[in-house]
Image: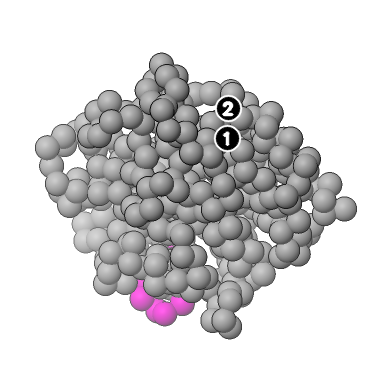
């Protein structure tokens, strides 16, 4: 435990987020950890206190939101290593009829010219997840292909679908076999089973069940697609997210000798791919120097999630920093999350010396 890290989280809980877990590792060893708040604090959008408010713990499970994109990317690079797909081949190879200018590299760098979001649940309210996925894949190009950068969940959903076709298995199975299984991440995956360990997210009266969403993906599009999609849907613990970050920091190393990815694949993932127009540099599925999460760790790579999650890795400092929160509980749009992320990053830099 870390008194300073605990104090940082205490400043944000419950005003910024009802629950938070943070880990800081230096050269692979956890040097600070803290958990604060309650996994379920509210029962509705009016901030009515819930009757049962279990405390957040280090092993609590959070909706990782867009950190899911890193798991999708790792699975895709694993498939590429096996020769089952190519980052620069048109996705029409696997998804016939798609615009020939769209490649996986462009999808993973958000330069394929696809719109940011598509509320397929509202467009097709009575359709099955399979029908909705088919419609998502048919989303036309509406912006310049090749750049500038345009953040798009639609593109990552398409990338996930390419992985399924090329890999001959559902995305959740591919991620389990090629990412979480390799790293030994027992608490990470889609549609978590241990509800009592999961942090609640937003009050969504349109969803079945009482209270705020808990144990189901927060993202509306992923939910409409059955809870498994390339852009969102993965749940996990801080230790598991840390393990993914450490593997990338070490060039793909993993427990047991079997690497997550080849060193050259990780190097390509973390290389600036030249996407113009973003407030940061972009690798494959990963952001480099994102000012929203890195704080004083300039040049660090990682990703954030809409629910209030973030992973930051700074190889020059030997640092991997994880902050998992449920800042959308019971409503989205709270202030202070960026400052909380920066404070944790600053503490990490202090500990790295």
Location of mark 2 (residue): 14
Q: Position of residue 59 (x, y in %)?
A: 54, 53
Write down the region rendered in magenta.
81-88
Q: Which mark is residue 114?
A: none
Q: Position of 133 compared to 74: left or right?
A: left
Quadrant of the rendered image containing residue 257: bottom right
Residue at figure coordinates x 31%, y 72% from the top left? 167
Residue at figure coordinates x 53%, y 23% from the top left? 334
Pointer 2 or 1: first along the chain: 2
Q: Position of 338 compared to 47: left or right?
A: right
Quadrant of the rendered image containing residue 325: top right
Task: Assign a secondary structure to mark 2.
Answer: loop
Out of 82 and 57, give the one closest to the viewer: 57
Residue 60 visible? The answer is yes
Membership of 84 in magenta stretch: yes
Q: Position of residue 120 (x, y in %)?
A: 24, 38
Location of mark 1 (residue): 37
Residue at figure coordinates x 61%, y 74% from the top left? 253
Quadrant of the rendered image containing residue 320: bottom right
């Amino acid at each position: 435990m870390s008194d300073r890290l605990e104090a940082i989280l205490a400043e944000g809980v419950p005003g910024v987020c009802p629950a938070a877990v943070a880990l800081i590792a230096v050269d692979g060893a956890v040097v600070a950890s803290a958990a604060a708040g309650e996994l379920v604090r509210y029962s509705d959008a009016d901030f009515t206190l819930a009757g049962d408010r279990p405390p957040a713990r280090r092993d609590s499970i959070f909706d990782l939101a867009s950190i899911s994109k890193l798991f999708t990317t790792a699975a895709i690079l694993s498939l590429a290593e096996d020769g089952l797909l190519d980052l620069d081949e048109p996705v029409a190879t696997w998804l016939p009829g798609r615009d020939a200018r769209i490649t996986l590299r462009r999808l993973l760098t958000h330069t394929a010219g696809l719109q940011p979001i598509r509320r397929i649940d509202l467009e097709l309210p009575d359709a099955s997840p399979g029908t909705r996925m088919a419609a998502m894949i048919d989303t036309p190009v509406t912006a310049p292909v090749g750049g500038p950068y345009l953040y798009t969940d639609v593109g990552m959903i398409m990338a996930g679908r390419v992985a399924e076709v090329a890999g001959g298995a559902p995305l959740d199975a591919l991620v389990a076999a090629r990412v979480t299984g390799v790293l030994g991440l027992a608490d990470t995956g889609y549609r978590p089973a241990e509800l009592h360990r999961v942090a609640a997210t937003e009050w969504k009266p349109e969803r079945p069940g009482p209270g705020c969403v808990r144990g189901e993906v927060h993202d509306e599009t992923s939910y409409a697609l059955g809870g498994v999609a390339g852009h969102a849907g993965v749940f996990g613990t801080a230790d598991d997210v840390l393990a993914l970050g450490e593997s990338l920091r070490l060039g793909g190393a993993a427990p047991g000798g079997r690497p997550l990815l080849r060193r050259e694949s990780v190097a390509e993932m973390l290389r600036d791919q030249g996407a113009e127009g973003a407030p940061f540099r972009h690798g494959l599925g990963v952001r480099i120097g994102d000012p929203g999460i890195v704080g004083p760790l300039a040049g660090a790579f990682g990703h954030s999630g809409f629910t209030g999650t973030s992973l930051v890795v700074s190889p020059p400092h030997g640092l991997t920093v994880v902050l998992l929160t449920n800042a959308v509980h019971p409503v989205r749009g709270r202030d202070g999350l960026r400052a909380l992320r920066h404070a944790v990053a600053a503490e990490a830099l202090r500990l790295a010396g």
